[in-house]
Every structure is written in C-alpha cells, then in structure tokens.
Image (spheres, rainbow, N blue to C red):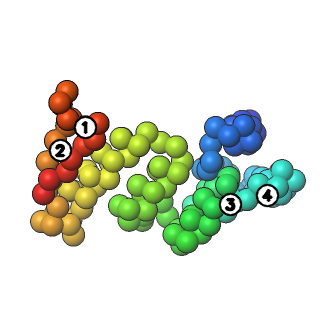
Amino acid sequence: MKVFAHHIQEYKRGLRGLVLYTTKRSNRDAIEKRLEREMIEYYIQEVNKTKINVFFGNSVCIAVIKQMNLTSLSNLTDEEDFILGTMLGYDRVKQCERYLKRKRTSANNLEKVSCKLKYPTADSEDSIAITT
C-alpha cells in the first residue's frame, strides 16, 4: 500500500492525470475509503478472484476508462491500448510504435496495414510521416 500512497501523492502534485494500481482484492475497502476521503475519482476493475485494477485520477480520464467497458486489459483494442497508455503517461513515441506494431501483427488487420516510417531529416519538419 506504500506504492498506492505514493501514486496519490504524484496525482495530487500534478505529475499524473491517471493512475493504474493493481493490488489484492482484500485491499479494496481501504483503497475506496482513502480515495473517497481524498475526493479522487476512481474506477475498479476486477482482474480475477484475488486481484483488482484501480484506476484513479482526473474525472475526465475516469470517464474515458468507464466508456471503454473494460473486461480485461488484454482485451483492449489497439486504439484503446494506445489511449490508455497515453493517459497513463507512457512515452508517446513508444506508444505510437506499440500501436503500429500491434496493427501490423494483428491477424484481422495484417493485410490492411503495411506502413513505412519516414523519419525526419535535418531539412524536414519535426514530425514522422506515415506512408501506406
């Protein structure tokens, strides 16, 4: 629960807009009481009989999480995975790379997506162009 308390501090200091904390189901009551006392929005997803995922942070971020109708993080669409990773503060470029890799290897999209990345040169703008 020390990590949980640290995540609350990071949220309150503005370092994170959304936090995902995975813990034992037996911690649920204590976590809910703490988040309610701190007046922090949250959403709890049951992982299995012994674990839960606790999403907490900005109310807009929590609304997006609820909109996703999460059943399991492993069942996220490529787009939901990208959105969630970005909202959790993961490196944006790495999230883009992960998204493109998932799209390329996804069985139902294998033939639809084949792209080459053109990296910027000294003469070009600071952006990555995707060509198909």
Q: Which image quadrant for residue 15?
A: top right
Q: Secondary structure at mark 3?
A: helix
Q: Which residue is mark 4?
A: 32
Residue shown at 47%/50% (left/top)? 85
Q: Secondary structure at mark 2?
A: strand
Comparing 31 with 7, the one in front is 7
Residue shown at 48%/60% (left/top)? 73
Q: With respect to residue 70, does 29 lie above or below?
A: above
Give the label on residue 125, or none.
Answer: 1
Give the label on residue 59, or none.
Answer: 3
Q: Residues within 10 Å of mark 3 (few under 14, many from 20)?
A: some
Check if mark 4's residue and mark 3's residue have beta carbons within 8 Å.
Answer: no
Give the label on residue 117, or none.
Answer: 2
How many angstroms separate mark 2 from mark 3 (CA)?
35 Å
How many angstroms separate mark 4 from mark 3 (CA)?
15 Å
Comparing 19 with 61, the one in front is 61
Q: Residues within 10 Å of mark 1 (few under 14, many from 20)?
A: few
Q: Is residue 130 visible?
A: yes
